[in-house]
Amino acid sequence: AAAAKEALSALRDDEIWIGGQVQFNRPFVEGLIARMSNDQRAAGPAFVAARAQQEKVVRAQPEFGPPWVVLGLIDAALGRKEEALSEGRRALELLPVEKDATVGGSLIIHFAVIAAWVGEKDLACQQLMVAIAPPRFLSYSGLKLSPLWDPLRGEPCFEKIVASLAPAERP
């Protein structure tokens, strides 16, 4: 977490691209770092600030999927389950993978994170199954190591997906 905070402080922009496909605001990343550090006192206010900023982005671009998925992630982090799922679904409707394989694939992954964060583990796994189908948008290491997927660890459906992507053992 210390390295993440240091990296964030080195960035000058208030807009941060994670994975190159979806733009996040600084308070969201601050909240994410706090969440991954189990610092709920810092995470909550950061996500509230992120939500206020992201609502403006959604109002400015209501027909573009990525801002909706970010709002969904923020609402998931705030425990606003129904809003988060609705916003994630809206993102997928606006920019399906069939229309834009790269960004649409990223939206599927982020929607899976939303589902995982709000406790909809089966839905998260369903989305991950889509994301690992060719062309693959996720890797073994991305699922195995990223703390974004912590809510799914130990879930049979998730472990099966991770195992399906594991590199083959060499003789």
Image (tube, rainbow, N blue to C red):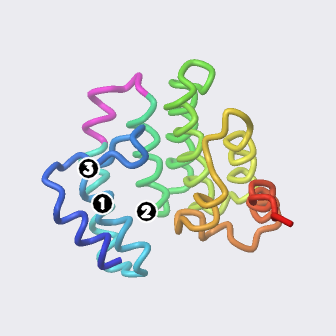
State the image coordinates of residue 103 (x, y, percent, origin top left): 49, 31
Q: Which residues are magenta?
A: 55-64
Question: In this picture, is 77 found above or below 133?
Answer: below
State the image coordinates of residue 4 (x, y, percent, origin top left): 32, 70
Which of the pair 165/9 is nearer the observer? 165
Q: Are marks 2 and 1 in contact (CB under 8 Å)?
A: yes
At a point 80% along the width and 55% down the height, the residue shown is 164
Residue 134 location, quadrant: top right
- Which amino acid does the dot numbered 3 rest on? Ala
Residue 48 counted in the magenta span: no
**Number of residues whose C-alpha sits closer than 10 Å to that of mark 3, classed few (under 14), some (14–19) or many (20 or more):** few
Q: Are marks 1 and 3 in contact (CB under 8 Å)?
A: yes
Question: In this picture, is 96 found above or below 53?
Answer: above
At a point 71% along the width and 44% down the height, the residue shown is 132
Is 10 situated left or right of 97 in this image? left
**What number of labels is visible?**
3
At a point 56% along the width and 18% down the height, the residue shown is 99
Task: Give the label on residue 78, or none.
Answer: 2
Question: In this picture, is 159 found above or below 84?
Answer: below
At a point 58% along the width and 25% down the height, the residue shown is 96
- Which amino acid does the dot numbered 2 rest on? Leu
Which of the pair 67/52 is nearer the observer? 67
Question: What is the C-alpha distance between the residues marked 2 and 3?
Answer: 12 Å
Residue lying furthest front: 171
Which quadrant: the N terminus? bottom left
Q: Which residue is the site of mark 1?
A: 48
